[in-house]
Image: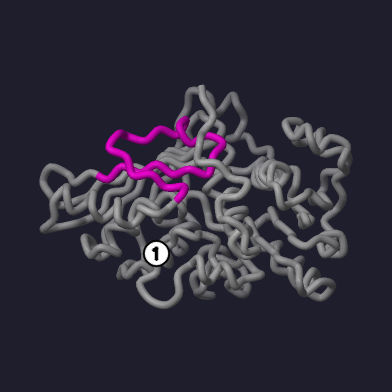
Amino acid sequence: MTLRVAVAGATGYAGGEALRLVAGHPDLTVGPLCAGTARGPIEDYQPHLQSLAGMQVSETRADLLAESDIAILGLPHGASAKVTSAIEDLNPDCLIVDLGADHRLASAADWEAYYGTEAAEPWTYGMPELIREEGPSQRELLAASTRIAAPGCNASAITFAAQPAIAAGLSEGTGIVASLAVGYSGAGKSLKPHLLASEGLGNAVAYGVGGSHRHIPEIAQNLQAAGGHTASLVMTPVLVPMSRGILATVSIPAAGTTQADVLEAYTAAYASEPFINVTSSQPATASVLGSNGVLICPVLDRDGERITVTCAIDNLGKGTAGAAIQSINLALGLEETTGLTVNGVAP
């Protein structure tokens, strides 16, 4: 038996990637497609999804979403909570996954400080690989959940890069400095002048500088779960002329350790992870394109005072929709890797 999946925000980048993965999943089938203002055949907005050609995009209505077993919400920040409440009234058994940020943060104060609106209820965080120092594992939490908050893409890359060092006691998690090269799909599909090809091609530009990026409290929350003592970090994402992908370079303070210790910590942390590979060569975003894979290379700096970790992910894959499908698999009791691949697309 296959389960129906409705997608809100089906015409956007994250929604489109979720649709692509659902369409290729053996236990899921695509249900109602919704969007804010877009209407008509889905191929007008997602022409690469040929198997879904002819399906119609409707307005975002709770009754349409509640018809399905699973609802994936790819809506603007702040929009998911209201829709969720209406879905719950109509179908309390519906498994709901939010691709936005509405339900990621446990701290209402952090949400209000970074997003400027009233905080919504925190949901189970959709990162199965999250290291938790205490309590049940993240996989156990997801297996018992019907409300899942998919992680942020930049937050995912930095978390994967930093949490093994913290969990192994090589770092307290303070003083972390991260620089990220980010593909333009991470900025969404809205038409804005700085996202035009004429502006982006041959160009690199930073954003969210000076501690203002909204993923910072999410990253701090993740690293605290691993045993870190940080509440903030220096994070500078840079838009670079590629469609999708993130290459995070994360500098982590450390002392009294060796390269062998670092490699052991990262290898042990991810030894049983189906989608995370620790490599001795520098990761490339092209190697994880279109996949749910994560490539990580940890190196102790020559002075022994910092660990530099590079991490490559597909921002739409493991950074968003892939993590959502992986979490859905766990919530449904399916094999975690179902419908997902660790292999990228090349050339």
| Quadrant of the drawing holding the N terminus | bottom right
Residue 295 drawn in magenta: yes
Residue 111 drawn in magenta: no
**Quarter of the rendering containing residue 19:** top right
Give amino acid for label 1: Ile
Q: Is residue 12 visible?
A: no
Q: Which residue is mark 1?
A: 131
Seen at 60% across and 55% down, the residue is: 324
SS for callout 1: loop
On the image, the x and y values in percent for residue 308 come to 26, 46
In-front residue for pair 121/21 = 21
Report how many numbered discs are placed on residues in the image: 1
Q: Is residue 227 visible?
A: yes
Seen at 47% across and 42% down, the residue is: 313
Seen at 78% across and 62% down, the residue is: 69
On the image, the x and y values in percent for residue 197 come to 60, 26
In-front residue for pair 163/145 = 145
Vertical position of residue 75 compared to residue 112: above or below: above
In the drawing, does residue 79 fall left or right of residue 321? right
- Which portion, as a residue range, is magenta? 274-298
In the drawing, does residue 246 fall left or right of residue 323? left
On the image, the x and y values in percent for residue 286 come to 47, 30
In the drawing, does residue 16 fall left or right of residue 117? right
**Quarter of the rendering containing residue 163:** bottom left
Seen at 88% across and 37% down, the residue is: 54
* Crowd tier of the residue under label 1, counting other residues whose Cα lies within 10 Å: few below 14, some 14–19, many 20 or above: many
On the image, the x and y values in percent for residue 231 come to 36, 68
Q: Which residue is situated farthest in the front direction here?
A: 1
In-front residue for pair 85/291 = 291
Colouring method of the image: one colour
Vertical position of residue 49 compared to residue 19: above or below: above
